[in-house]
Image (tube, rainbow, N blue to C red):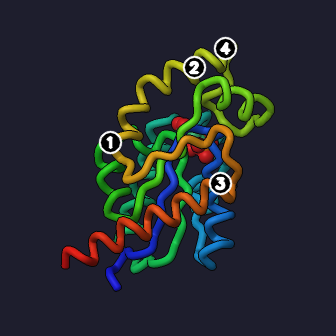
Amino acid sequence: MKKHEGNIVLIGFMGTGKSTVGRELKRLLSAELIDMDQEIEKRDGRKIREIFAQDGESFFRQKETELLEYFLTQSYQNTIISTGGGVIISEKNRSLLKQIGFVAWLRADAETIHQRTKTAKTRPILHTENPLQVIQELLEIRTPLYESAADLTIDVNGLDKNEIAVGIMESMRYQQSREDEKV
Ligand code: S3P
């Protein structure tokens, strides 16, 4: 078995269900689950909104890169990694993600994301007067980046967590079997 075989990396904008789908994949695959936001909070000893407020976004981005680099040094297998929505901004991170596992992009439209993120107070980037506009602007910038990082794109609108998780699992297995045929 290869060093990072069976790992699934979930990417996507805030509110697309990465954490929920991560937990469903963990259940279905009896896998380990690592939530990057939680891991950064644990290591840093502060909440993400505190890190943003005290040290700024670029400090947080640096923590994301350090964590991905750490993952690569580990022999993780059968592990689900749920990322923060902005992890794909850095080119370095996009390349690290691909080395860590099968990258699934959970895609949703701006309105759905707005509805899903409206009540949560945990996301500093959306603490603005007009969050829908921020979501639209960021989606425009980030969509090609998610696209280039992803091995699979899955439209989450209208699908439940189980349907999304099963779709990801099947697609990963199919891709792995094609790679095994090539060897
Ligand atoms: C961010 C998304 C958040 C968190 C941070 C920044 C972003 O994660 O990493 O608030 O830039 O999109 P979730 O996507 O899990 O909410």
Mark 4 residue type: Asn
Mark 3 residue type: Ser
Mark 1 residue type: Ser
SS at mark 3 in the image? helix
Who comes first in sequence, dot 2 or dot 1? 2
Tell me the mark number nearer the camera, choosing from 1 and 4: 1
The residue carrying mark 4 is 130
Residue occupying the point 54% across, 47% down: 84
Quarter location, residue 20: bottom right
Considering every residue shown, the one lying at the far bottom of the view is 1
SS at mark 2 in the image? helix
Tell me the mark number nearer the camera, choosing from 3 and 4: 3
Does residue 72 sit above or below 62 in this rendering?
Answer: below
Who comes first in sequence, dot 1 or dot 3? 3
Residue occupying the point 42% across, 51% down: 152
Is any part of residue 27 visible from this angle? yes
Who comes first in sequence, dot 3 or dot 4? 3
The residue carrying mark 2 is 134
The residue carrying pointer 4 sits among few (fewer than 14), some (14 to 19) or many (20 or more) residues within 10 Å by Cα, namely few
**Label at residue 67:** none
Residue 81: give x, y in percent of width and height.
Answer: 52, 62
Q: Regarding ligand 1, which quadrant of the image does it lie in? A: top right
| Relative horizontal placement of residue 136, taking residue 93 as reference (left or right) | right
Mark 2 residue type: Val
The residue carrying pointer 2 sits among few (fewer than 14), some (14 to 19) or many (20 or more) residues within 10 Å by Cα, namely some
The residue carrying pointer 1 sits among few (fewer than 14), some (14 to 19) or many (20 or more) residues within 10 Å by Cα, namely some
| Relative horizontal placement of residue 115, taking residue 68 as reference (left or right) | right
Marks 2/1: CA distance?
22 Å
Tell me the mark number nearer the camera, choosing from 3 and 2: 3
Residue 133: give x, y in percent of width and height.
Answer: 59, 15
